[in-house]
Image (spheres, grey):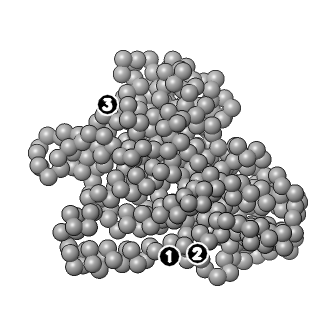
Amino acid sequence: MTDVIARDQALALDAADALAPLREQFVLPPGVIYLDGNSLGVLPRSTAARVQQVVTQEWGTDLITSWNKAGWMDLPLRVGDKIGRLVGAGAGQMVVADSTSVNLFKVLSAALSISQAGAPQRQVILSERSNFPTDLYIAEALARERGFELVLAEPEELPGLLDARTAVLMLTHVNYRTGRMHDMAALTHAAHEAGALTVWDLAHSAGAVPVDLQGAEADFAIGCGYKYLNGGPGAPAFVWVHPQHVDRFWQPLAGWIGHAAPFEFTPGYRPAQGISRYLCGTPAVLSLAALECGVDTLLAAEPLGGMAALRHKSLALTRLFAAQVEATCPALKLVSPRDDALRGSQVCLAHADIAYPVVQALIARGVIGDFRAPNILRFGFTPLYLRFVDAWDAAHHLQQVLQSEEWRRPEFNQKNAVT
């Protein structure tokens, strides 16, 4: 980690930051340091007007003609192409639809069928023990339904467990609790050497770290739109399938929009060619319009160096914050990797007893992070809108909360429904 610095040095870093103008794209409440963009991105300034346009003009005036006139039917592919630019997907290879969980069900079902075709001994779904719970729940349900076995392991154990019984290696690229990032290319190569396929969840990667799906020769990928992509609460998710697999399987949710000719209204299903077959129901137009605004905030960084520049700033922000915390808050343990190559765009700290009330006390001070059970204080760093002085100030607030024992106040120890 970097050396501890003074606040005026953080301000100097901000003054020299070429990405600083990107902050103006967002509505940021005064007095708030927002370190939770890895749960819900902030509101882009363009979103409200765009959604209002869709509501009042495209829906309110043009009504159903907007499916053609305003290009509503093209939104899943159009927005998918924009996200694809952030994660190394080719044009026409990604589509936006449904939720992350639903898309995982689609691609994991496809991957299991493709992997087991001609190789019935492949009966194992291999994943990380601390993978995001919904991913494990979906895998568990599919394993039970289709007679597979779900095997969970620590990250360092995964390569050694890939064998002739492995059908799919299913991983979240950046771990939600620790911020640890897998080597996508290396693990994909190891899976392929064992004859298995890979499914990657990019929920904490897309818009946060550089991803090259095609370069890594990944097989399937999904991810959500409401975190680093700034698409708004409940924004639709995205799905990508390598071109060599995309037409090999009917995804299990064979809905009308994924039909080769949806408006023929034939009783028999005929899947669309390409990634469009991974669509299911009618596109969520209002949510897609909002998501497109969020993705555009990231694409605005392309002239300034794109994802590589954002990653460079992200690493600097997380190093600064972690160094300040370690120097001033000895009661907390850093659980995110120190190695830049292994760390996503978040810093996670642990305390066995007081993680939850400390986070609540910080939120009351306007420093918004979140708590992840059982003992994690989690802070996401979104370089589009965060400043170096924000990272410095957040660490200082954390120090004050601990030294003053503000966290002991009763209201900070009452568990909320959402943590």
Labels 2 & 1 near each other (Cβ < 8 A): yes
Residue 57: percent from left, percent from top: 27, 78
Q: CA distance from mark 3 to mark 2?
A: 45 Å
At horizontal 44% and vertical 28% (from top left) the residue drawn is 148
Query: Callout 2: 10 Å neighbours few (<14), some, many (20+)?
Result: few
Which image quadrant is residue 112 in?
Answer: top left
Q: Nearer the viewer, residue 94 or 109?
A: 94
Residue 255: percent from left, percent from top: 24, 48
Kindly state the secondary structure of the residue where label 2 is placed.
helix
Q: Nearer the viewer, residue 136 or 175?
A: 175
Image vertical order of residue 95 relative to residue 387, above or below: above
Labels 3 & 1 near each other (Cβ < 8 A): no
Q: Give the amino acid at mark 1.
A: Arg
Query: Callout 1: 10 Å neighbours few (<14), some, many (20+)?
Result: some
- The residue under label 2 is 24
Labels 3 & 2 near each other (Cβ < 8 A): no
Q: Is residue 310 left or right of residue 340?
A: left
Q: CA distance from mark 3 to mark 1?
A: 42 Å
Q: CA distance from mark 2 to mark 1?
A: 8 Å
Q: Is residue 224 left or right of residue 36?
A: left
- The residue under label 3 is 248
